[in-house]
Image (cartoon, rainbow, N blue to C red):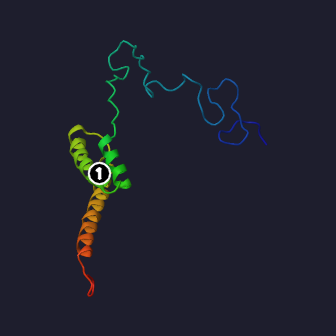
């Protein structure tokens, strides 16, 4: 068995004085000329474009208060007065949301739907009361 160095064999190390490291790596700075570009200078902090330009912060979007009120009143009904107000507030808040780009469109739509259902039940209750109150039974005085 010879004690000569053979690249790629496990446990084999190059003889002293060569620029090869174990694993086939070279000493830093010993690459052939032209194979890697020299690193450029770092830009100074005064160079435009070095630091990302920060724009002004956008104001956070707020949720429309009328949309919230519409949903709450639509859920509570408050003897149908809440349903009517939920419908009105929901319609006003939808136009306000389009104009001002606020959040709460879904809340306004939910308030409109619940308010509309409440108004529908109010109309049905009035019809039932009107029809039911005028029935006379035979033999009644």
The quadrant of the image that shows the C terminus is bottom left
Q: Total label count?
A: 1
Residue at the spot 24% in from the left edge and 65% down from the top edge: 123
Residue furthest right in the image? 1
Label 1 sits on a secondary structure element that is helix
Residue furthest front in the image? 141
Return the residue at label 1.
86
Residue at the spot 61% in from the left edge and 26% down from the top edge: 19
Task: Answer few, some or many: residues within 10 Å of disc 1's Cα (few below 14, many 20 plus, some between 14 and 19).
Answer: many
Asked whether, in this view, residue 101 is left or right of residue 71, the answer is left
- Name the one closer to the observer, 128 or 73: 128
For the question of whether residue 43 can be seen, the reply is yes
- Name the one closer to the observer, 35 or 102: 102
Look at the picture and state if 129 lies above or below 101: below
* x and y, in percent, of residue 59 in the image: 32, 30
Asked whether, in this view, residue 104 is left or right of residue 95, the answer is right
* x and y, in percent, of residue 49 in the image: 33, 20
* x and y, in percent, of residue 121 in the image: 29, 65
* Snapshot quadrant of residue 140: bottom left
Look at the picture and state if 39 lies above or below 101: above
Residue at the spot 37% in from the left edge and 19% down from the top edge: 50
For the question of whether residue 64 can be seen, the reply is no
Residue at the spot 64% in from the left edge and 26% down from the top edge: 18
* x and y, in percent, of residue 84 in the image: 26, 53
- Name the one closer to the observer, 9 or 136: 136
* Snapshot quadrant of residue 35: top left
Look at the picture and state if 3 lies above or below 19: below
Asked whether, in this view, residue 1 is left or right of residue 90, the answer is right
Look at the picture and state if 127 lies above or below 79: below
């Amino acid at each position: 068995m010879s004690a000569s160095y053979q690249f790629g064999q496990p446990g084999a190390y190059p003889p002293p004085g060569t620029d090869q490291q174990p694993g086939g790596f070279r000493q830093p700075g010993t690459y052939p000329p032209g194979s890697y570009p020299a690193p450029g200078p770092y830009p100074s902090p005064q160079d435009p474009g070095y630091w990302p330009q920060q724009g002004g912060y956008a104001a956070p979007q707020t949720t429309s208060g009328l949309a919230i009120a519409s949903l709450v009143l639509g859920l509570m009904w408050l003897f149908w007065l809440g349903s009517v107000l939920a419908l009105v507030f929901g319609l006003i808040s939808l136009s306000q949301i389009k104009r001002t780009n606020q959040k709460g469109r879904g809340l306004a739509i939910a308030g409109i739907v619940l308010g509309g259902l409440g108004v529908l039940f109010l109309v049905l209750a009035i019809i039932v009361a009107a029809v039911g109150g005028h029935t006379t039974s035979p033999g009644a005085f």
